[in-house]
Image (spheres, helix red, strand yellow):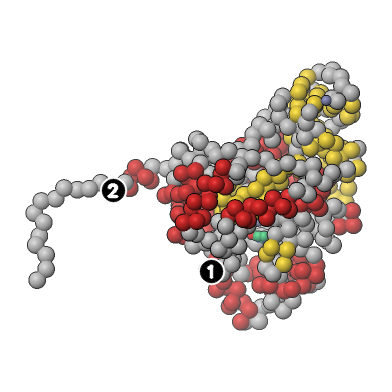
Amino acid sequence: MTTVIKGGTVVTADLTYKADVKIDGGKIIEIGPDLSGDEILDASGCYVMPGGIDPHTHLEMPFMGTYSADDFASGTRAALAGGTTMVVDFALPSPGQSLLDALQMWDNKSSQAACDYSYHMAITWWSEQVFDEMKAITEKGINTFKHFMAYKGALMVNDDELYASFKRCAELGATPLVHAENGDVVAELTAKLLAEGNTGPEAHAYSRPPQVEGEATNRAIMIADMAGAPLYVVHTSCEEAHEAIRRAKMQGKRVWGEPLIQHLVLDESEYFNPDWDHAARRVMSPPFRNKQHQDSLWAGLASGTLSCVATDHCAFTTDQKRFGVGDFSKIPNGTGGLEDRLPVLWTYGVNTGRITMNEFVAVTSTNIAKILNCYPKKGAVLVGADADLIVMDPEKTKTISAGTQASAIDYNVFEGIEVKGLPRYVLTRGYVAVDNGDLKAKEGHGEFVAREPNATVNKALSKWKELTAPRPVERTGIPATGV
Ligand code: DUC
Ligand code: ZN
Ligand code: ZN
Ligand code: ZN
């Protein structure tokens, strides 16, 4: 059976043009005028775009004494409802655990997924076993490894471990990712704030100022450079981190930054809301920043110094957030956004003129597929690509509300925001998961997307190696030593 998306305007990362899109067997088979097929989806007045890819989610993740509340079933339903057709989740070994065991755990959970998915593998400890298993992980189609520079005593890895793992990534053609915050300083500031009686959620923001992110981002960039690896910096939230990424790019380094939709739109004033639950529900790391940082992130998306918009979807219920009453450091860190990323970015980015429609497609889909090495299977409207598509109606509006969301939690950090620009249809490998606005996500439809190592990406780094390669000097007249 063939399906034709008819009468729409195709919008890709580089082109905007009128065409129909024909689908068979889950793939795009033809793009052009006046196509016919067995099933017709009316796209008049709409934009036909590659489905969103969220490169950063935490579904059913064990974290801070609990599990994030959205699993692969509810998380991918939420994704599809908002036009996201692929998620990349973090497989997280506990320190000491085999990477392959952690991968098996994630494979068990992801069988519920309604859209396609892939994984990043986290490096939470270091040993010869980890070194060896990294190769086995790349052979299973995972070419990205995540490192936490914060969460001291739990997930954090130190600089020697970062350097060793980045070197291993370089050898394997894999890309390291970093959560860049200086975990030692965060731990010091947290202890000081608590000792002084600052126990509320607003202290979470004080414990993680932009400097801890800027410092760690710089450090990770330099370590990646010495290791000969590219670097993907997750949840870039502030000018200090953006500046480090800009500088690296100007030096010809392959470094990418990923702002979150939450940081682009929500600011630190949320933590000063007198309602404890309101503030705690917004506790995540890095925390929300002020308007100047937001302007910096928007400028980065427009100029291309920042590459992707993600969510870090890591949703906790209000009851879970209340673990931290009396001690902000026990509030599970994380916010949701899977369903809202695209409509909110369209509303605040495209409708305001901050970014173009083509830039929107680039930062929500195409750039991500290219960096993570699954383009053009994903992230493209091209013959042969997977039919992961959104038919986006730019006139459709709604008010975001927890009452109507697919996520399993009881609130939404974007509650009350009016969005304009919503999916009429969402297709996941040809299956119509949003049908004229109705969500028909099919649990278990999602497939794993294998991503090959990237043979070329590691090679164009700085001249550090050349400049610092040891050059033995032949010396004469060596003075006698000793007494
Ligand atoms: N930050 C969060 O807020 N949650 C999950 C992990 C992280 O780094
Ligand atoms: Zn068919
Ligand atoms: Zn993180
Ligand atoms: Zn994260």
The residue nearer to you, when weighing 47 against 148, is 148
Q: Which residue corresponds to the image point at 49% horizontal and 51% vertical from the top-left?
A: 132
Between the C-alphas of marks 2 and 1, the distance is 34 Å
Q: Which residue is mark 2?
A: 470
406 to 45, vertically: above or below: below
Q: Within 10 angstroms of label 1, few (less than 14), some, or many (20 or more) residues?
A: some
Tell whether label 1 touches label 2 (CB within 8 Å): no
Check disc 1 and give the amino acid type. Val
Badge 2 marks a residue whose secondary structure is loop
Q: Within 10 angstroms of label 2, few (less than 14), some, or many (20 or more) residues?
A: few
The residue nearer to you, when weighing 260 against 108, is 108
Looking at the picture, how far across and down is residue 407, in whole percent?
82, 55
Looking at the picture, how far across and down is residue 448, in whole percent?
69, 42
Q: Which residue is mark 1?
A: 185
* Number of numbered discs: 2
Taking 421 as reference, is 176 left or right? left
Picture quarter with ligand 1:
bottom right
Badge 1 marks a residue whose secondary structure is helix
Check disc 2 and give the amino acid type. Pro
Quadrant hosting residue 237 = bottom right
Q: Quadrant of the N terminus?
A: top right
Taking 315 as reference, is 177 left or right? left
Quadrant hosting residue 40 = top right
155 to 301, vertically: above or below: below
Quadrant hosting residue 186 = bottom right
Q: Which residue corresponds to the image point at 83% horizontal and 58% vertical from the top-left?
A: 408
- Earlier in the chain: of badge 2 and badge 1, it is 1
Looking at the picture, how far across and down is residue 121, in whole percent?
60, 51
Q: Is residue 240 visible?
A: no
Looking at the picture, how far across and down is residue 4, in whole percent?
84, 25
